[in-house]
Amino acid sequence: MIQLTGINRKAIHLAPTAIASVTEAGASSPWHGICVIARTFGGQVLEVRDRADDIVR
């Protein structure tokens, strides 16, 4: 399990194999605390504060 931080600063625990894609958020998203949009194979879209490089590692 890995831990991601949601935009509400709550922890999200997710199996690394569940992540389908990790995309840097657009230019206005960091203003709202969103650094990355992570999509799961189940279709869930997660807006998280973590950096893409940290998630990929």
Image (spheres, rainbow, N blue to C red):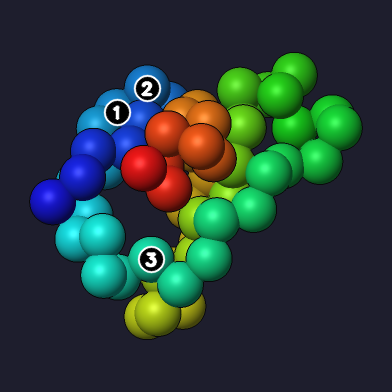
The image position of residue 13, as x and y in percent, is 19, 46
Please tell me whether mark 1 sits on a helix, a strand or a loop. loop
Q: Which residue is mark 2?
A: 9
Q: Is residue 46 above or below residue 54?
A: below
Residue 7 in view in this figure: no
Q: Which residue is mark 3?
A: 19
User: Which residue sits at x=61%, y=23%?
Assistant: 33
Q: Disc 3 or disc 2, which is closer to the eye?
A: 3
User: Which residue sits at x=30%, y=70%?
Assistant: 18
Q: Which residue is mark 1?
A: 10
> How many numbered markers are drawn?
3
Quadrant into which the C terminus falls:
top left
The image position of residue 6, as x and y in percent, is 41, 34
Q: Earlier in the sequence, mark 3 or mark 2?
A: 2
Q: In the depicted view, which residue is nearer to us: 24 or 28?
A: 24
Q: Are marks 2 and 1 in contact (CB under 8 Å)?
A: yes
Q: Is residue 6 above or below residue 9?
A: below
Residue 12 occupies which quadrant of the picture? top left
